[in-house]
Amino acid sequence: MAVDLLLGLQWGDEGKGKIVDVLTANYDIIARFQGGPNAGHTLEFDGIKHVLHTIPSGIFHDNAVNIVGNGVVIDPVIFKKELDNLEKFNIDIKSKLLISRKAHLILPTHRLLDAASEAAKGKAKIGSTLKGIGPTYMDKTGRNGIRVGDTELANWKEKYRALANKHEAMINFYNVDVQYDLAELEEEFFEAVKVLKSLTFIDSEEYLHQAQKSGKSILAEGAQGSLLDIDFGTYPFVTSSNTTAAGACTGLGVPPNKIKDVFGIFKAYTTRVGSGPFPTELFDKDGETMGRVGNEFGATTGRKRRCGWLDLVALKYAVQVNGVTQLMMMKGDVLSGFKTLKVCTAYEYKGETIQHLPFNIEEENVKPIYSELPGWDEDLTGMTEAEQLPQNLIKYIEFLEEALEVPIKIVSVGPDRTQTIHR
Ligand code: GDP
Ligand code: IMO
Ligand code: MG
């Protein structure tokens, strides 16, 4: 049985959580493959909104097992809070949520290091979520990290101490004002590790291999978005993992020839939270309207998201890098009421018109060139069938499909599970 992937194609927050929840009915296994609690995946049903950070978005369905893969970094403290939030839903966590022994742990000092690194950068800061993501992946690739499976070993606390001591020296090196009480943080951390250890640890690559052999269907859930990918994103204003399709292979141990569909999710416009270039960013009333109607505030940090028109140059790049086979367009409802919609179809770059993403997309290098399309006034949020969609929205969709050369199979018209139109 093949593995399908679901990935964000922009700068994150495209609506991955919602769509994974919608698609989970079709899968036996949902597996997160990278990122950590920098992610905030929102899903809504029965009038309740849920935000997940580490736990895969299939957790509310009885039919699926959820796996936190080896490519994920786990903060036991945040993880425990997520579990606490799930308590009232009577989910059998021990059998429904399995954790890879090879996933790395975020230590309290990783979070402090993140804060120190950002403070030292001053104006050039990445705008990190300050969840310790960068420092944890640095320790992973530096071969110093502590993995979930290590906590089953007798000497793991010695390993912890050595690493935390090193981190403290590094924090001092930054010479910035980061206040903390490590003893208190450690107490909370070790309590949370106990909770983590009460869950089921697995060798997830083996589990997934056997699951495929026995005909089980698997959906891999991405975090962040392609433009935040460590290799292909707007470096250095990116996250520290491969958010693109290849990340699912390394983050789960799934071979490339087992991957079938790659679902690419994008918003009908663009948002970004944190620093970094954003060619189609709006600073006017239109941007303000998108932010207000779309309720564009980060699910993890509550920060205001920057808003702008859809950037087809960047989207095409993401479609290419991921090998997207089906597209899903989110938040079309937010664009209702705009008289004219703009879509960036090319950049003016060093006096030339280009249609690919150049090395540097800083504001001073790149000027977006827009096509204009007529908007629609209809409220989409109550619509359930493709036939109900307004003509001008269909034109918008067809314009994008032609440019991206991939069909848009789902149009999302609101945050709820039911506000999902299949085409
Ligand atoms: P993720 O990180 O990709 O899972 O996305 P987030 O959960 O961070 O952000 C997406 C936000 O948009 C959430 O608040 C969702 O509830 C909401 N959302 C998802 N799809 C739609 C949609 O089609 N319309 C509207 N208005 N909101 C949506
Ligand atoms: P989901 O999965 C949006 C952004 C941060 C910052 C940069 C680096 O909900 O789409 P990090 O904490 O990783 O060091 O931050 O990446 N970022 C996200 N933006 N959605 C996310 O996740 C993000 N995860 C990280 O804002 O600019
Ligand atoms: Mg999010």
Image (cartoon, rainbow, N blue to C red):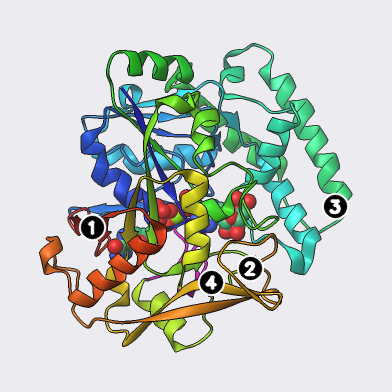
The mark lying in front, picked from 4 and 3, is 4
Q: Main secondary structure of the magenta part?
A: loop
- Range drawn in magenta: 295-309
Q: Amino acid at mark 2?
A: Pro
- Marks 1 and 3 sit apart, C-alpha to C-alpha, by 44 Å
Q: Amino acid at mark 4?
A: Ala
Mark closest to the chain's N terminus, 4 or 1? 4
Query: Can you see residue 4?
Result: yes
Circle 2 residue: 277
Apparent side of residue 339 relative to residue 391 in the rendered image (left or right): right
Looking at the image, which residue is at 53% across and 84% down? 283
Label 4–label 3 contact, CB within 8 A: no
The one nearer the camera, 255 or 192, is 255
The residue nearer to you, when weighing 245 against 240, is 245
Between marks 4 and 1, how big is the CA–CA gap? 34 Å
Give the crowd class for mark 1: few <14, some 14-19, many >=20 residues within 10 Å.
many
Which class describes the residues within 10 Å of circle 4: few (<14), some (14-19), or many (20+)? Answer: many
N-terminal label among 2 and 4: 2
Q: Quadrant of residue 234?
A: bottom right
Q: In which quadrant will I find the C terminus? A: bottom left
Which tag is nearer the camera, tag 2 or tag 4? Answer: 4
Which residue is under mark 3?
174
> To which residue does mark 1 refer?
416
Q: Determine whether the residue tagged by mark 3 lies in a helix, strand or loop.
A: helix
